[in-house]
Amino acid sequence: MQTHQDKRGLAITVAGAAAADAHDALTDAYLGFRIDTGGRLKAALQADPEAPLHQTMAGYIFHLMCQKPLLERAAAASAKATSLAENRGNAREKLHAQALAAWTAGDLRAAVQALEAVLIDWPTDVLALKLAHYLHFYLGDVAEHRDSVARVMPHWRPHIPGYAAVLGMRAFGLEEAGHYDEAERFGRRAVELDPSDTWSIHAVTHVLEMQGRHREGIAWVARDVSAWDGKVHNFANHVWWHKALYHLELDEPEAVLDLYDNRFRSEATDDGLDIANAAAMLMRLKCRDVNCGDRWEALAAVAATKAADHILPFNDLHIALAFAGAGRGSLADAMAARGAAGDDHWAAIYRDIAAPMAAGIAAYGTGDYAAAVKALAPVRYAWGAIGGSHAQRDVFQQMLIDAAMRAGDWRHASALLAERQALKPHSRDTARRAAQAAAAVSVAAAG
Ligand SMILES: [Fe+2]
């Protein structure tokens, strides 16, 4: 076992130069959402199964895939990584092994803290940066998500491999924190430097979504598809999902369904993000009275196979959307039981936030709109803790508004719509609903 350097000059403990190259190739694949990430992982493990960071990366990737059968493999990789790092790893590799062990134990705060500790001493550890970016995102840490990348920026230069990806992370952190102009500058610069960097493309799609620039957004996603589509794994589906969001806002449901059928739900996968894309889009259409036919049941049948996993409340809540649309039962009790049974990071969030949301979603599905409002309204300022983006969680806000309107709770609907119009002054759907609610309130006042 020798010390080599990765392509950013960080020391890694590996058997030889070929294993160091395999580490770099795996890191690049992970950073770029590349279709060959699994193959790169296998190659790294074959090149040197005793390299501490190879085992740690295996554990990280198993967790990132969010599949129950892979959690045992993540735990095995974590145990091996801990032992290897203790016996022969350097200080950075030991911290990575600690991050993986904390993640495996369900202590996501400790995991992200270990990654942030890596970044204090090794700010060009792009693997730690990307993993911290992911965890802050799912922990709902908007300010930390932004600042985590800001802290390392002074140490990055354009010649350091991964620079464009770092700019893309900076862009997305800024976007989620509401700094849209700065986010767009970083995102566009990143895409100029690396047209295939899908996370950077995606960061700009979020800016355009949040600013209501829907026509620009459609053109942005479609402008250089060959640079990323077909090279990126299922994250590409999420980019197509964003294009569908723009069409939805422009009152083009046929285009939305075309993208659903031919892009982001063309395959009936059981991946959590794929299910989330599909369920959230069908629910947005349902709120607009668009008939989605048998898509609901097809989606719910796949989602049902993941309903007992309870790995991420974000994923569970999207399964709940699929169930609500397909006329299946409530998942609120199961989520509450998951909360009561665990002592990990997610337990309290399942109990206090996800279970009430699931109750509201189920009530919406059965047409008990007053109950939906009653369940969703009290937790709406807390549901950032389930993670995901503002654009993704917006489906729950749209359901709350729609439920208030369908329940005839016009004053509440009108108040929610006033708030939404202040945030989204270009939204046609919001303007239409606000006018409808205002008219209903004045009729009631006149009566
Ligand atoms: Fe997104």
Image: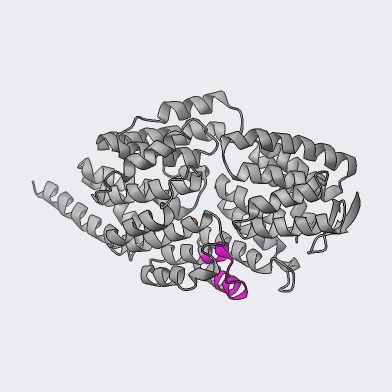
Residue 366, image x and y in percent?
Answer: 27, 34
Residue at 44% from the left image edge and 60% from the top image edge: 240
Total numbered labels: 0
Q: Which residues are magenta?
A: 186-201
Residue at 89% from the left image edge and 40% from the top image edge: 87
Q: Quadrant of residue 80?
A: top right
Of 38 and 182, which appears nearest the observer?
Answer: 38
**Is-magenta flag for residue 205?**
no
Residue at 73% from the left image edge and 38% from the top image edge: 77
- The reply to whether residue 131 is in sight is no
Residue 333, image x and y in percent?
Answer: 42, 26
Residue 21, image x and y in percent?
Answer: 79, 59
**Is-magenta flag for residue 191?**
yes
**175 on left or right of 149:** left
- The reply to whether residue 443 is in sight is yes
Residue furthest left as drawn: 447
